[in-house]
Image: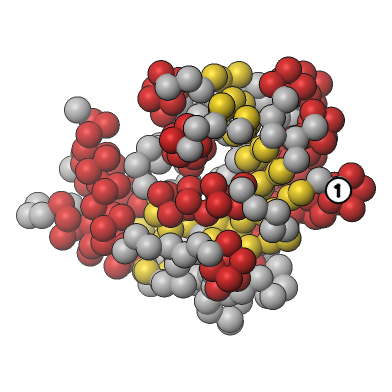
Amino acid sequence: MRSIVTGGAGFIGSNLVDALLDAGDEVLVVDNMSSGREINLTDGLRRGATLERQDVRDASGLLGIFQAFRPERVFHLAAQIDVRVSIDDPALDAEVNVIGTINALEATHQSGAGRFVFASTGGAIYGETETIPTSEAEEPLPMAGYGQSKFCAERYLGLYERLYGLSTIALRFSNVYGPRQDPGGEAGVIAIFCGCLRDGKSPTIYGDGTQTRDYLYVGDLVDALVVAGGTQASGVLNAGTRQETSVLGLVRLLGEIHGEGAPEPRFAPPRLGELDRSCLDATRAHEILGWSATTDIADGLRLTYEGALAEAR
């Protein structure tokens, strides 16, 4: 199977590349390296994956790469993922997440690929909701440009199904964490906290720390992506754990993993566009894909912290 992974040098993308190689795929990574890191692909490139440095906003450049490789399936993970950036510069956010997705869909269609898997977002699309855990039936009410652009991009998947018969699916991720997440470059509180503990610095909590998220270990998400890529299931599916963990709870668990001398957190005012609670109901993913998250938060945090320590060596 020939697979393209856009954003494949990033945290999630590089883990997906490894899994696809394990499955015997021929893998091409497309990444402009604005936030991706070649070190994430060290093992993947050694095992035969190839890397094309290309921005998804460049439609003709992207199409040329797709037509040369002739993928059978495409995993579109390239994105602008920072909520704060999407509020400060919503046009940039839409250019990457909407136009970039349209370009990837068009390149997929014109190169003859049969399957398109889109990395979407859960909490940022649903916004503030009283229904926790939140299912796909909830009306999307994004509170930031990031969620709005991802929701808009999802609609184009349906358009390409209706126009061209392209098989597509969108997975709405909860808050993903795990090894390779960049504490300085990607929007992941767990990676940031692990980096702080590793370096002996106090992590900063924005707000009072009672806000909750559904934290999904990257290995579980990669399993969902691979399964989704091998089916013809369509529409949108949540990928989450149905479990809420507060920011204060994260600090406590990581402090226990770190042991004596863990720095105490500092508190700062809450940030615009961030939610009080977010947790996804992934029942449909289990029913349709046979997938469920299996990694306990404590186990996932330990693996992530050990990974942060290993990177520092």
- In the visual, does 299 lie left or right of 39? left
Residue 257 appearing in the image: yes
Examine the rendered structure and indicate whether residue 185 appears above or below residue 248. above
**Identity of the residue drawn at 63% across and 40% down:** 75
Examine the rendered structure and indicate whether residue 183 appears above or below residue 41. below
Residue 123 rendering spot, x and y as whole percentages:
57, 63
Image quarter in which the C terminus is found: top left
Examine the rendered structure and indicate whether residue 308 appears above or below residue 264. above
Residue 209 rendering spot, x and y as whole percentages:
36, 67
Q: Name the one closer to the observer, 102 or 168.
A: 168
Q: Name the one closer to the observer, 282 or 164.
A: 164
Q: Residue 310: which quarter of the image?
A: top left
Residue beneath disc 1: 165
Residue 104 rendering spot, x and y as whole percentages:
74, 35
Q: Secondary structure at mark 1?
A: loop
- In the visual, does 146 lie left or right of 175? right
Residue 274 appearing in the image: no
Residue 308 rendering spot, x and y as whole percentages:
27, 39
Q: Name the one closer to the observer, 136 or 199.
A: 136
**Identity of the residue drawn at 81% across and 45% down:** 166
Residue ranking furthest to the right: 163
**Identity of the residue drawn at 86% across and 48% down:** 165
**Identity of the residue drawn at 74% across and 29% down:** 57
- In the visual, does 34 lie left or right of 69? left
Amino acid type, label 1: Gly
